[in-house]
Image (tube, grey):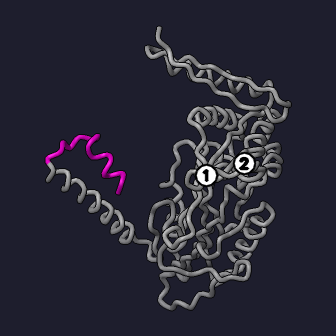
Amino acid sequence: MESQRITVSRSVSRRGAKRFSVEISKARSGGGGDVFDRGLACLFRCCRIQGPCCTFAGVVGALGLGRETRGVKPPSPTPPFVMKCFERLVMRHIKTQLPPFLDPMQFVYRPNRSTDDAIFTTLHLALTHLDNKDLYVRMLFIDFSSAFNRIIPQHLIEKLNLLGLNASLCNLILDFLTGRPQSVRIGNSISSTTTLGTGAPQGCVLSPLLFTLLTRNCVAMHSSNHIIKFADDMIVVGLISKNDESAYREEVQRLTAWCGANNLSLNVDKTKEIVVDFRRAQSDQSPLIIDGSSVEIVKSTKFLGVHLADNLTWSLNTSSITKKAQQHLFFLRRLRKTHLSMVPCSTEGPLRAS
């Protein structure tokens, strides 16, 4: 039987210079996927015995300093495909050890939940509150500065221990977050390697889950406030009654203090606030002050890919979707003029490029 061999080699940073390798024979005919899964499971068992080993080297391409690169997120190293498969096994194992009930307002990694549920919950809270007279709602859309890069591994491990994760799994996660070699590439030149000891790698499978576990205790303290989360996207919803915003403003202050205690930084320039007020006699709303800077009050903003407006209508979001659809239809018309076949393989490239 013809087979394809895949070799994975990782160093064990906490057990000296020992190395181990796992060879996976993936048959090209029948049952190959099962063999591949068993090989990764064997890799996981080997890690449990010999110690953590989820470090990988990364090379980051540097951005220029011109105007065209302003506002562009810096690139991040992409982990190997085999390591992503291994991370999914680790993530599955982590989920089996988590308590059944965590934060009900965190919608990521929950069965039968998606971004739509987070958006619908936000709108339901606001609309239900606005059914009564003389009430309004303030929504604070949080933006973190490099959220994943500011995770302190030791602090995260302490929280994982409180959740009941066993020591060997915590050590595996700690090694995944520390001792990661990384270098920068500019053209054909590559810098010397630097070992990173903080943050979670961008583009990894485990990083959003670890950030979710880090923020699990970031919950609203007052009954009139709600903190809705989807990974690192967060909204503070304040249900204001009798023009009393004290509970809402105290909630924002507690959130700011919590971020400081967990080494997270709020990007005040990108953090926006929407005031939903349908009262006839509307008063001027004073902006929130975070770290000495005022938060901008806007008419609309984007949350989880959906445009939310202060009138809670779908007009802006519908217009945005229509505009994107028209852009895609333009490429389809061009394809029709060139007499190309309208099969998925012919249209996939132009549509993704748009």
What type of secondary structure mainly makes up the magenta span? helix
17 vs 257, nearest the viewer: 17
Please check the rendered image and state whether residue 142 is part of the magenta-colored stretch, yes or no: no
Q: Which residue is mark 2?
A: 193
Label 1 sits on what residue type?
A: Ser
Q: Position of residue 54 (x, y in %)?
A: 71, 36
Hey, which quadrant is residue 292 in on the image?
bottom right
172 vs 15, nearest the viewer: 15
124 vs 80, nearest the viewer: 80
Q: Position of residue 267 (x, y in %)?
A: 65, 71
Quarter in which the C terminus is drawn:
bottom left
Left or right: where 271 falls relative to 171: left
Q: Disc 1 vs disc 2: Cβ atoms closer than 8 Å?
A: no
Label 2 sits on what residue type?
A: Thr
Question: Regarding mark 1 in the picture, which secondary structure is present there?
Answer: strand
What's the mark number on residue 189? 1
How many marks the image carries: the answer is 2
Magenta stretch in the rendered image: 339-354
Tell me the mark number nearer the camera, choosing from 1 and 2. 1
Question: Regarding mark 2 in the picture, which secondary structure is present there?
Answer: loop
What's the mark number on residue 170? none
Left or right: where 297 falls relative to 343: right
